[in-house]
Each structure stands twice: as structure tokens, then as C-alpha cells.
Amino acid sequence: MQQTFSDLEYKGRARQTRKEAFLEQMEAIIPWTEWVKVIEPYYYPDRTRGRKPLGLEKMLRMYLLQCWFNLSDEGVEDAIYDSYAMRKFMGLNFLTEKVPDATTLLHFRHMLEECRAGEAMFEAINDVLEANGLIMHGGTIVDATIINAPSSTKNQDKARDPEMHQTKKGNE
């Protein structure tokens, strides 16, 4: 793909955003050809009517952006126009093509639901993320809220609890 002036300008920035790093990682680990082959039999099997369908991989990428960033159909369309990292992930060149509209994404999402490819994709995404150590299965949440408590010597033994520690909040 030929570079544009915005591509050249973007390469000169000081650092890479977290969104761009995440999308580059997904670009590298997702087996695109395999996933396209899974959906291909269901994607516009009758191509004789209507306008020509958009590329399956582009629609898949747009759908994944929607899932990963929790966006509405219109929201993902706008985000692709706004975000260079998303446009780069989609492989779009605004000089020659446009972003698929929200309705096209809606129809694509419904097609995935009808053929149950979405469920297979979800499992495949989890497998890929787990294989690359990018998914968290469990953890511990610790609440470190400071609360008022009675004096540590007001217990049955009238002694200080050896595991208790004090702290200051503000100047108290």
C-alpha cells in the first residue's frame, strides 16, 4: 500500500500509543486466513444481486474493533475515521476507499450470529490470546481503604495485635 502524507507524519511521532501497540499485537497473532475461511461460506453466497460486498477481512477487522473497544456500529465507524491506529489496522487508504458504514457492519454482525460463527470466533480469540499469554484467568482484588478503627489495645487480652499496623491519612 502506498504511503500517504499522514503515514509519514505519524511515523515521526515521539511514542506509540497503547491502542496502536495492542492492535499491532493482534495483527501479529490472529490467523487471518483461517478465520476468513471459516466465515467465507456464509458471507454473501449469492453475489449476483445488489452492490458488490466489501472485503471479508475488512469487515472481520471492523467487527473485532467493535468488540475489543466496546463500540456501537456508528461508534466504530467514527473511531476508524478518527484514529490513525484503527485505520492502519483496517488497512484503509482514504484516497482509494472508504470506511464500511454502520449498516454494513450491522448486517455482517447479524450474519455472524445467524451462522453461529461469532461463537467460534470468540473461542478462537480466547485460544489465541491464551496461547500468547495475553488473557488473565484469575487474580486478587485488594481493598486498601483507610477506615477509622478503635484502639488496638481494647481487645480481650488488653494487648496490641502483632499483625496490626497503623497509618496516617492526611496529617492524622
Image (cartoon, rainbow, N blue to C red):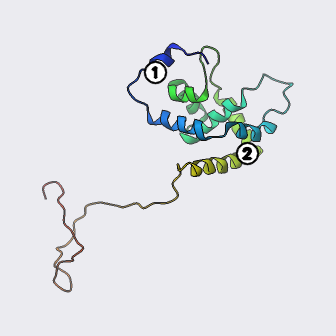
- Can the viewer see residue 4? yes
Residue 94 screen position, x and y as percent: 59, 17
Q: Secondary structure at mark 2?
A: helix
Name the residue that disc number 2 marks: 117
Q: Which mark is residue 43?
A: none
Residue 114 screen position, x and y as percent: 76, 44
- Residue 114 vs residue 43, the one in the foreground: 43
Check if mark 1's residue and mark 2's residue have beta carbons within 8 Å. Answer: no
Crowding around mark 1 (Cα neighbors within 10 Å: few <14, some 14 to 19, many 20+) is some
Mark 1 belongs to which amino acid?
Tyr
Mark 2 belongs to which amino acid?
Ala
Q: Across the whole image, how many numbered discs are drawn on residues?
A: 2
Name the residue that disc number 1 marks: 10
Q: Residue furthest left?
A: 171
Asked if residue 108 is positioned above or below residue 117 in the image, the reply reads above
Q: Secondary structure at mark 1?
A: helix
